[in-house]
Each structure stands twice: as C-alpha cells, then as structure tokens.
C-alpha cells in the first residue's frame, strides 16, 4: 500500500489501471526489486507475475513509502537542550540560549559528534537526504563549516547531506555578505538569509538576490516566523523573483504570518508565490512550540502557514523537521513521520490525506534537486520504508513503530543512537 503521489507506475497511468485504493488514496501495488537493489518495475497489484525463481514477500497490507527527504534541519544545534534550554519558550529566548551555548561549548569534536548523532537517527528512521542550515554570521563559521564538509563526505553513501549558509539578512550588507556567498558557491551550498520585517527589508532582500545572481546561487530563506500580520517578507521575496526574473530556485521556510493576514492579502500573496514558483517549507513542530507562546496563557493559534490554500494554488510544499532537542524545539528525533503526524493534525491535512506524503518525499527531493529520490519508480534505488501499519491511523498512531528500512533493497541493521553517547566527558 503506497501513498498517493509517491510512486510512478512503470507502464501507464494510475487512472488507466483503476488501482485499488483505500479511502485516503493509498494504492495497492507490486514492487519488483532487482538483485542490485534497484527497482525494476512498479505495477498495479496482481497485474503481473514474477518469474518462478524470484522470491516474493507478501506485505499483508503494510504501507510502503519511499525514503524520506528532510529539506530543512539545523543539525548544528541539535541535542543541546540539556545544557542550553529555552528560558521562556519564545523565539527570542531560543536565540539567546543558542548563542550562549555556541560561544561556550562548541568545538569541532563536540559539534561533529552531535551532527553525526543527528544523521544516524535520521538514517535509522528511513531518511535518505537532509539539508541543514548552518549558522554563518561573522565569527560563527567555526567549527560548523569544516565539520559540515567532513560529515557530507563521511555520509555520502548513506545520506545526501546538503547545506545552506544561514544568517540574519542584515549581515549580508558589506563584505561579509560577499564572503558567505563566495564560500557557498565554492562548496555547492545555498545562501540562507533570515528575513525580518522593517524599513530596510526591501533593500536587504535586493542585496540577497544580487549576491545569488552574481554567483548562480539558490536562495533558501527563513521568513515571517512570527504572528505579526504586518510581516510580509514572503510577498517582498515573491515580488523580487518576479521583478528580476530570477532563475535560481527560491525556497521560503515558515511563512507563519501568512495565516494571520486578511483573506484578501493572503490570497494576493499566495498568487504571487505561485507565479514566482517559490517552494514553501513548513516546520510544524517548531511553529507549534514557539508561536503564540505566553508565560500563562494557552496558545490560540497553531503557528503554521496556510498549507492547504498554498497547495490548492499549485505551490510546492514540503514539511520538514527544523530543530531537534535544542532551544528552538526540545523534542523530535529527526523522523519525518513525527513531522508528518504533527502536520496532519495541526493543518487538517486529512479527509482524505491524499498525496500529502509527497511533502516529506518527492516534493522536498525536487526542492533539493535530487532526481529519483523520494519516489518509488523503476530505475530508482529500493530505498523504502515498510511500516507495520496498514493505513494512516495504524502508521501514525504508533509513530511508525515497527518499521523496516530498506536501502538498495536490503534491510539496514543500524539502531537508534543512545543519548548517553552525547554525555560529555567531565
Ligand atoms: Zn530553520
């Protein structure tokens, strides 16, 4: 049983076969895997029969997903909550705690160990590609930039690790902006401005586009991570893409304030985002944790962007993990099923769930420029996640427990790393 939109039939379209589906659109398929671990054929269940010498595994109704793609993580900060908790649960509190920790505790080995731990957890959960943001303000590039390069190489045969150099957009003004953009170009990374609302925003966004245009970089923004309805960085970015005919890929993460704007203003912004072909990445776990935080009051909004409206307008949407066990979000385990479950409930992405699983598989694969990833199709490696659960309630109720992760057709033997490995020698 394969989620809608996460597979390509080898011959013909899903319509031509009148696939057997459940009420959420999950399709019943046969997947033929060759000896080299490459998918040979994806067909409607029961329409073909394998040669007699090929072993057949009856899945007994289990859901099978392509390997997950996490398009937005911060593994440089992961697993620091224990020593640097958020004092008040706000975004500002998180920034302060993260800075304090970075200054006092981070060195190459310490950072490498946490980032590696994060990738090991992601791998065991079935993730095949991760893009991490890397703090890139002046004076903050060590030890994370070199640690990232080393990890990208060390993990190359198991996880595609991509990086975005991320910093407050004001810091791009002046020579440091050129330095960051040059380093991104040199190492195949993206430029990741964090946009804040204010009178300078237009000028700052122009600077980001200039830096990207002169070097052929993609732009991977954080924007509008706030409940302030006046914050409209997303509109400004869409305007800039359209005015400049910018040809590189542009991704915008969070876009939370879109959900706080008037119907008319939101509709106009969504139309521009669609026209500019901007991809939106939503980070539901961090949003629900940080947004609408108050010392005593219960939160009254969910913090997420207008997922359903954006999708209806044809905008590509990914769901991603963002922060894990750090001051921005003390929970999570680099598991896209965790993210997907939160997103389904917070965003009402069900009745039916339909092709929303694309938001943690094929759509972020496209955003990351990874052909053949996040999709079950002939010619792709059999990187699959096989769940015990047979429908979404069974899969999501137990957080996908009992899953079997295949890489190139073989079950991985690794297990989740032990938190004790992160205990520091004293
Ligand atoms: Zn982020």
Image: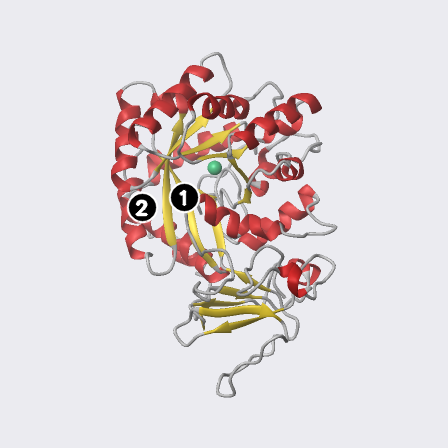
Ligand 1 is within 8 Å of the C-beta of the residue at disc 1 = no
Could you say where residue 134 lies in the image, as x and y percent from the top left? 37, 38
Could you say where residue 229 lies in the image, as x and y percent from the top left? 63, 21
Residue 307 quadrant: top right
Give the secondary structure at mark 1.
strand
Give the mark nearer the N terminus: 1 vs 2. 1
Residue at figure coordinates x 42%, y 22% from the top left: 244
Residue at figure coordinates x 56%, y 48% from the top left: 359
| Residue that label 2 marks | 148
Quadrant (top left, top right, bottom left, bottom right) of the N terminus = bottom right
Mark 1 in CB contact with mark 2 (< 8 angstroms):
yes
Q: Report crowding for label 2: few under 14, some 14 to 19, many 20 or more residues within 10 A (C-alpha).
A: many
Could you say where residue 231 lies in the image, as x and y percent from the top left? 57, 21
| Residue that label 1 marks | 132
Q: Is residue 59 left or right of residue 425?
A: right
Q: Which mark is residue 283?
A: none
């Amino acid at each position: 049983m394969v989620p809608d939109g996460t597979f390509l039939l080898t011959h013909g379209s899903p319509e031509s076969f009148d696939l057997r589906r459940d009420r959420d659109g999950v399709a019943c398929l046969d997947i033929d895997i060759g000896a080299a671990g490459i998918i040979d054929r994806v067909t409607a269940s029961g329409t073909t029969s394998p040669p007699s010498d090929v072993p057949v595994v009856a899945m007994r109704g289990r859901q099978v997903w392509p390997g997950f793609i996490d398009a937005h993580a911060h593994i440089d900060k992961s697993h620091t909550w224990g020593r640097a908790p958020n004092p008040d649960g706000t975004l500002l509190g998180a920034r302060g705690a993260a800075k304090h920790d970075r200054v006092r505790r981070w060195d190459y080995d310490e950072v490498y160990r946490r980032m590696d731990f994060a990738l090991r957890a992601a791998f065991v959960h079935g993730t095949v590609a991760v893009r991490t943001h890397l703090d890139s303000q002046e004076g903050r590039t060590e030890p994370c930039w070199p640690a990232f390069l080393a990890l990208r190489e060390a993990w190359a045969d198991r996880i595609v690790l991509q990086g975005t150099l991320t910093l407050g957009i004001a810091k791009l003004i002046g020579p440091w902006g050129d330095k960051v953009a040059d380093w991104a170009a040199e190492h195949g990374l993206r430029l990741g401005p964090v946009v804040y609302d204010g009178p300078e925003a237009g000028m700052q966004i122009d600077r980001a586009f200039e830096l990207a245009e002169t070097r052929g970089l993609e732009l991977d923004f954080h924007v509008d991570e706030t409940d302030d309805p006046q914050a409209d960085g997303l509109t400004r970015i869409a305007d800039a893409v359209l005015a400049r005919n910018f040809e590189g890929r542009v991704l915008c993460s969070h876009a939370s304030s879109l959900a706080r704007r008037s119907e008319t203003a939101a509709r106009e912004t969504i139309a521009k985002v669609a026209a500019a072909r901007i991809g939106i990445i939503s980070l539901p776990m961090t949003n629900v944790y940080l947004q609408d935080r108050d010392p005593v009051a219960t939160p009254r909004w969910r913090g997420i962007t207008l997922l359903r409206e954006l999708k209806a307008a044809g905008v590509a949407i990914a769901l991603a993990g963002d922060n894990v066990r750090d001051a921005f979000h003390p929970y999570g385990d680099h598991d896209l099923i965790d993210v997907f479950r939160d997103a389904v409930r917070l965003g009402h992405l069900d009745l039916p769930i339909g092709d929303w699983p694309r938001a943690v598989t094929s759509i972020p694969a496209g955003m990351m420029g990874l052909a053949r990833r996040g999709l079950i199709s002939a010619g792709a490696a059999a990187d699959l996640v096989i769940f015990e659960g047979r429908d979404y309630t069974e899969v999501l109720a137990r957080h996908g427990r009992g899953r079997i992760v295949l890489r190139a057709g073989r079950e991985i033997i690794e297990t989740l790393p032990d938190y004790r490995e992160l205990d520091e020698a004293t």
